[in-house]
Amino acid sequence: MRELILERPWLFTSERLPWVGRGRSIEEFLVRLHLSALYKNKRASQESLGALQDRKLKHLLRSATRVPFWENRIGAQLLRSNEPLSLIRALPVTTKDDLRRIPIEERTDGRLAAHYGVLSHTSGSTGEPLAFFVDRRLRTRFWALILRVGGLRDVSQKSLVHLWPSPNPNFSFDNHYYAKTMDDLREQKQEIYDLVSGPKSVVFGFPSLVRFVFDLARQDDVTLRPRTVILAGEALTTEARAWFLENSSSRVVNLYGCREISVMAGQCEQGRFHENSEDVLFEVVSEQGAPLKKGESGRLLVTALNNVLAPFIRYDTGDCGAFYSDPCPCGDRSPSFTFDGRTHDVSAIMLPDGSRISPYRLTGIFNRRFDKIRQYQIEHYAPSAFRIFIIPTERYTQEDEAGMLVDMKRIAKTDEVSVNRVDAISLCGLKALPYVKSFGE
């Protein structure tokens, strides 16, 4: 049973097991099945983890040939090989731009998507919006992975409070609060306080938003003691980590994931990130795509081993990292690594009237037009002035530009907004940033 749960997680869901009935209690029972298998596998040997990845990779590659984009990339040699972990490196690196250049139907298994697909999109943190389908059969698996990263054995969905800077299409969250502006969190604060005050509550969200809520509570003389705080979505800086340790009596953990792939790794008490080897396969390559040895830093590629509906194979995360060559002192035997990236400024944008908005509210303007824009960048160069840089696709029209200007002016509360069509966008650090604050620095 355990091996089947690890290898075919989409089979253990109320979508696939109607004979067990439906409802929250059944789903939570299935989450516990996943979680039990994942915890038992936590101290599996490297050989065992490698063998599991080998079997899952074979299944993924066979399934991917039903998808036009991947059928053209995967050769018959890979399907016949007994060493897919080695031969997969013969496949080219897949970038977000590669996927954005083709219709979503050509990178999706239409048969599965018709039954289990949920349309989603990236958060816009790279300025390159991408739409894709997620498999709702993996809902229970997603929950189990979050719980394992958090060191939790059981938690109700009602007990998890999700704080995010944009509307999240993920179907796994009930208590979801997103911040169009920081004032939105202020308006919802009492409801959030009541939920977080529960003895079994778990907070999951961006460090900046979670910290903002904790600061609000302290100003209101309210004590928040969630069972666990799980942080994700932006870099957890040394200063931010120290703040949480000083101002929260809760256990604080850091999760590494993305909407395209789901939960990819969790950080242990030694500061290392451990690969969720049952669900993903990481590689580190040079700028030219050559494999690097452990200890050498390069581009992080990830293959989602469970995603047969809309495969992501050798997908460039946009982050850089390096794997450790020695076992982690924490005792977890899964591969451990460190990574850089997602270090862009996500602090709230201050407007002249004193209000603050999250940069991620602005990214939604462009994410809704993902088929019209190849890449974008927002420069907040004066208190009431913004410049937008756009690399358009062939579908981009003057009407799209006019609509973006209307949306941007409304949200930013200013008429000082310009749009500039460009051929390239300069890099700031490891990623092209959607939001660059330059004035007053």
Image (cartoon, helix red, strand yellow):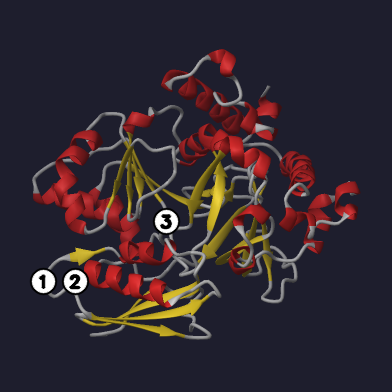
Q: Residue at x 48, y 84 (%)?
A: 426
| Disc 2 residue crowd, few under 14, some 14–19, many 20+, Cα 10 Å | some
| Mark in front: 1 vs 3 | 1
Q: Is residue 410 above or below residue 33?
A: below
Marks 2/1 in contact by CB < 8 Å: the verdict is: yes
Q: Would you say the residues marked 1 and 3 are in contact, meaning their CB atoms lie under 8 Å apart? A: no
Q: Residue at x 48, y 18 (%)?
A: 22
Q: Amino acid at mark 2?
A: Lys
**Residue 90 appears at what percent x and percent y?**
81, 63
Question: Residue 283 — which label?
Answer: none
What residue sits right under mark 2 in the picture? 413
Q: CA distance from mark 2 to mark 3?
A: 27 Å
Closer to the chain start, of discs 2 and 1, is 1
Q: Is residue 339 above or below residue 262?
A: below
On the rendered image, what quadrant is the C terminus found in?
A: bottom left
Residue 377, quarter of picture: bottom left
> Earlier along the polypeptide chain: callout 1 or callout 3?
3
Residue at image coords 37%, 62%: 364
SS category of the residue bearing label 1: loop
Label 2's element?
loop
Tag 1: Cα neighbours inside 10 Å, few (<14), some, or many (≥20)?
few
Mark toward the viewer: 2 or 3: 2
Q: Which residue is mark 3?
A: 233
Q: Position of residue 110 (x, y in %)?
A: 66, 44
Where is residue 272? Give x, y as percent.
53, 54
Pick the residue in front: 384 or 213. Answer: 384
What secondary structure is found at the residue carrying circle 3? loop
Mark 2 or 3, nearer chain start = 3
Residue at 40%, 70% (x, y): give it. 344
Residue 269 position within the rendered picture, expressed as x and y whole percent measured from the top left: 46, 48
The tag on residue 353 is 1
